[in-house]
Image (cartoon, helix red, strand yellow):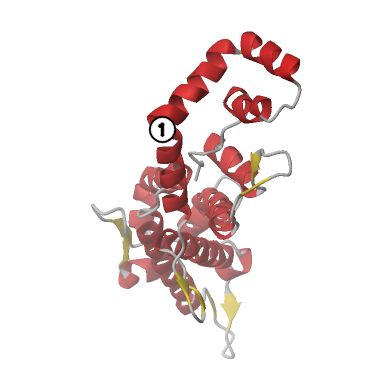
Amino acid sequence: MPSVFSISGANSMFFANSSSKNSNDSVSSIFGETSTLLGDYSMIKSGSYKKLLTAYYASQKTDNKSNGTSTSGSTANLVDIKTNAVKLKQSLSKLSETSLYEKKTDKDGKSDYDRDAITSAVKNFVDAYNNYIDASGNADSTSLLRRSVSIVNNTNANSVLLSKSGISIGKDNKLSLDEDTLKKTDVNVLKTLFTGVGSLSDTISSKANESYGIANSAVFNNNHAASYTYSGAYTTFANTNSWFEGLM
């Protein structure tokens, strides 16, 4: 979350120049940066700096308990997104295994696909997908929402093949599974959906991985307070991640 008090450059000159012990340097600075200093002075006099500070510390407030620090609502949602992104990737990893779509020979010498194993893998995917959609839909991050929308759009683009596999898409963008239809599905349809580079599975897994990274960075930001350096500059290591996340 970008800090309202990540002020650098011109806005920090007032404090740097005000601390100067050399009167000639101060005069030179004042005349050289007249508009900047007057602007800073105006903000202080009007109380704007105080409002910025108040807003900043309010946004950084954490719910500290005597036995530890409880997770804030925002951080809880981010952790939920991380958890469900991992589960979604794991379910897709299972579905992408080519061995899942190979015929098995039973003790009687009959060769057929392990439909039960395929059904179990698809069910896990549907559950993981729906849980991820629920979690990411509550995100405050535009970057996380972009990933969720991308996943939904790619899923919708494959609706015909999904339907042939017994998977339908609801108005809430969640998936539902008809196991009877799935067990009769041509295995090649499933392989097209869930195996290989560029498949639906590959695309969703990639976006889930990006979501995990963004959520993980945001959790780091929430758990690491910013501070001032010895020179008075405002800094936090996590702000680098916030800046990067904002570009994604």
Which residue occupies the foreground of this view, 125 or 68? 68
Which residue appears at 42% of the width and 52% of the height?
58
114 w.r.t. 13: above or below: below
Quadrant housing residue 46: top left
Secondary structure state at the residue bearing disc 1: helix
Q: Amino acid at mark 1?
A: Ser
Kindly identify which residue carries mark 1: 48
- For residue 131, say whether it is visible: yes
Above or below for 117 versus 204: below
Towards the viewer: 163 or 92: 92
Front one among 32 and 224 = 32
Mark 1: few/some/many CA within 10 Å (<14, 14-19, 20+): few
Residue reaching furthest to the left:
171
Q: Residue at x 46, y 46 (%)?
A: 56
Give the left or right position of residue 32, taking residue 100 as reference.
right
Considering depth in this image, is 79 or 238 the residue closer to the camera? Answer: 238
Q: Where residue 117 sits: x, y (%)?
A: 50, 77
Q: Position of residue 9 (x, y in %)?
A: 63, 25
The image shows residue 186 at horizontal and vertical percentages of: 44, 61
Q: Is residue 152 left or right of residue 222?
A: left
Quarter of the image for the C terminus: give it: top right
Give the residue at x 39% y 63%: 73
Left or right of 13? Residue 180 is left
At 59% from the left and 55% from the top, the residue drawn is 225
Q: How many numbered callouts? A: 1
One can see residue 154 in this view? no
- The spot of residue 89 in percent (x, y) is 55, 61
